[in-house]
Image: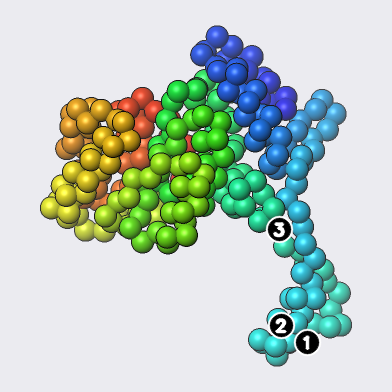
Amino acid sequence: MIVWRRRLQENKGNNIDSILLEHFQREIWSKVPHLEEKPDEVKVVNATPLIDITEDLRECARKEYGLNLADIDLRVFGKFDSNLLAGSIKVRPAVHIVHDAIVTGKLRRGQTIFEATSGNFGIALGQIAKLGIDVVTLVSRKLQEGVFEELRNEKVRIINLDMDICPAPGMKDNPNLLVAKATASNIRSQLSELGFDPAIFDKSLSEVEKLLASQDIINLAKFLAKIYGCFCPEQYDK
């Protein structure tokens, strides 16, 4: 708590949206695991529930591997992540990244968040969408329909790419400029349908095609956020 209060003081006057921050803390921050710092202690608030899975592990070891762990003194616990807000394992990083963006003045009401996702992070960002922040995700053609449905249920807007999402910047397949041009046209159309000015996209078309040719969807999300004056959580850089 002291850390974000200190950041508020450091960034006082730097365009911090205090109404968004208050709403975020009440509706989201107070419900997810986070550290609360006081002068004499640091404690975990809303810790993820731990489930004792010792007997399940012993049974699995016996049946699957022929190992007898009955006489071994051990206790094994697993994190029960399905109890987290939105039931997504990515809610912790998503919430902390967005919280930091708000207290440093990088994210305000009326802005849009762009991010590439294979599912979990986008679902977690859906909680932010409920606060009135527009969330647009770049997703892979191989995303399961159930994930698409969850994203839509969370009010996340989707740009469906006709290519796979690169796991991380720098891990790229062979460039294919023809596919990149076709995909860029598809993205332009979807952005226009979502209300974004296609003229801005057209001015940066060559850079978009370059990123698509390298299948660098992670940096494409950053780039779209940049040219449209939006925010990108940059989860892969955290």
Distance of label 2 from label 1 (alpha carbons): 7 Å
Residue indicated by mark 2: 61
Instruction: Give the amino acid type for the residue marked by disc 3 in the picture.
Output: Lys
Left or right of 161, for residue 130: right
Q: Position of residue 40 (x, y in %)?
A: 85, 29
Q: Is residue 131 above or below residue 184?
A: above
Nearer to us in this view, 68 or 19: 19
Instruction: Give the amino acid type for the residue marked by disc 2 in the picture.
Output: Ala
Residues packed near mark 3 inside 10 Å, few (<14), some (14 to 19) or many (20 plus):
some
Nearer to us in this view, 234 or 116: 116
Nearer to us in this view, 132 or 60: 132
Q: Secondary structure at mark 1?
A: loop
Q: Secondary structure at mark 3?
A: strand
Could you tell me which quadrant the N terminus lies in? top right
Q: Quadrant of residue 144?
A: bottom left
Decide if residue 169 is in sight here: no
Q: Secondary structure at mark 2?
A: helix
Q: Is residue 194 above or below residue 210?
A: above
What label sits on residue 79 in the rendered view? 3
Q: Tell me which residue sits at (79%, 35%) in the image.
A: 42
Residue indicated by mark 1: 68
- The tag earlier along the polypeptide, 2 or 1, is 2
- The tag earlier along the polypeptide, 3 or 2, is 2
Q: Position of residue 37 (x, y in %)?
A: 76, 30
Camera-near label (1 vs 3) is: 3
